[in-house]
Amino acid sequence: MSFAPAELLSDSFATDPHPVYHRMRGAAPVLWHEPTAGWYVTGHREVGALLREPTLSARPGDGFTDRLTGGDRAAGDRVEDFFDRWMVFSDAPAHTRLRTAASAMCAPRAAEAWRDAASRDANTLLADLDLNTADFAHDFALPLATAVTCDFLGVPADDREQLGVWSDALMAYLAAQWAEPATTRQADRALAELRAYLTARTAARPRDAPSPCLDMLAAVGPDNAPALFAQLLTGGIEPVAACLATAIAETAAGPGPVLEADTADLVEEALRFDAPFHIVPRTATAELVVAGSRLRPGDRVVLVIAAANRDPLVHRDPDRFTPGRPAAGRHLAFGAGQHYCLGAPLARTVLTAGLEAVRQRLRSAAVRGVTAEREPRVGATVWRRVALMA
């Protein structure tokens, strides 16, 4: 099966990546991509193993800010230091300290306690929606994920809009192929304002007021607190909203058995079918042979979980949305190993509550069609619009 390296840099790939992932995986489970100077791993077995490989560092390789100059380069250095403190981009022992501090707040039992609140929020949002005019990506999935995540983090309702602005600026920086002056300046400004916001919240907190989030942030110290807070905030909103929109679109468009499938099965299949984050970047720290390819220290390695989740060696007819399929739990949407997503329990809580509320509404409506438009984005699923025709 042929794969042209230029496909990874094309506009069509950013809009519809799965055909390209299919060709990459069919060509070889591990491919060197000269234009981006990296190894791309697409086979399920190989990606699953490398997510657990101790000689692969979660720290991104150098070079992302090389095109910046002057004040923009200084801003880029500050933003890079911020992202280097994220759990997802750090190694032990720093990663271990951060994960330990956040583990109690993100435990399954803690996430389960938010199920009723998530259901109430979902039904409140749905009550105000017209099925024929609603955009379920932006009128339902995004505000639901935002509401539950902000409540979980103890963010007052009046602060959510501003936090969304900061989150968008930080994610725009991460989404670029290279650090760009405009997005770097916006991210640097968002980071400074976020630091000031958390400092003010901490100072204004009454001594006897319980706040698991602020306690967690105090445990990691002022240098790491903004990074941990931002990772939990962004990780709880955009990817969860994207997956919920995927689940709604595929459930509404599917035949009767799909609509009547178990909600938990629908959630797991949505995670497998279109993982919110497509790639996991790694850097080799030792020589490693994978599927016959020799990786050397310093090599950039891109684990393409969106491709691995559709590997036909694991999932039969993988490009078909099939809830309840065998081996459904083997998807890698939340990663694996020591970097397995701490927010997975809360994400599943929001996804289950949101999708169940929508299914109840759909059972009393005859959906005649679904319009689902993707936003061009490399490495992530972002929906421009998900609309139903009832």
Image: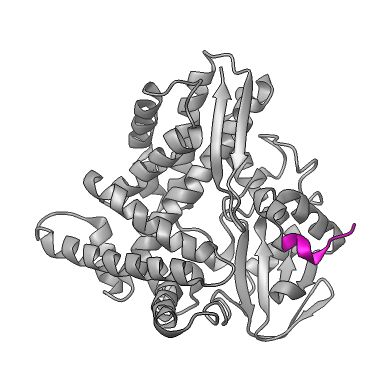
Membership of 15 in magenta stretch = no
In the rendered image, residue 375, in percent from the top left (x then y), is placed at: 58, 47
Q: What quarter of the picture does the N terminus occupy?
A: bottom right
Q: Please give the name of the residue rendered at 43% of the width and 49% of the height, measured from the top-left corner.
A: 237
The mark tally for this picture is 0
In the rendered image, residue 248, in percent from the top left (x then y), is placed at: 56, 32
Relative to 122, residue 268 above or below: below
- The residue lying furthest to the right in this view is 1
> Is residue 264 at least partly visible in the picture?
no
* In this picture, residue 274 sits left or right of residue 172: right
Q: Please give the name of the residue rendered at 78% of the width and 68% of the height, measured from the top-left corner.
A: 30
Name the residue nearer the viewer: 259 or 373.
373
Q: Please give the name of the residue rendered at 39% of the width and 82% of the height, measured from the top-left corner.
A: 71
Q: What quarter of the picture does the C terminus occupy?
A: top right
Name the residue nearer the viewer: 95 or 321.
321
Relative to 116, residue 77 above or below: below
In the rendered structure, which segment of residues is drawn in magenta? 1-8
Name the residue nearer the viewer: 188 or 101.
188
Membership of 3 in magenta stretch = yes
> Is residue 236 at least partly visible in the picture?
yes
In the rendered image, residue 314, in percent from the top left (x then y), is placed at: 77, 50
Relative to 112, residue 71 above or below: below
* In this picture, residue 9 sits left or right of residue 219: right
* In this picture, residue 5 sits left or right of residue 165: right
Name the residue nearer the viewer: 366 or 313.
366
In the rendered image, residue 49, in percent from the top left (x then y), is placed at: 69, 67
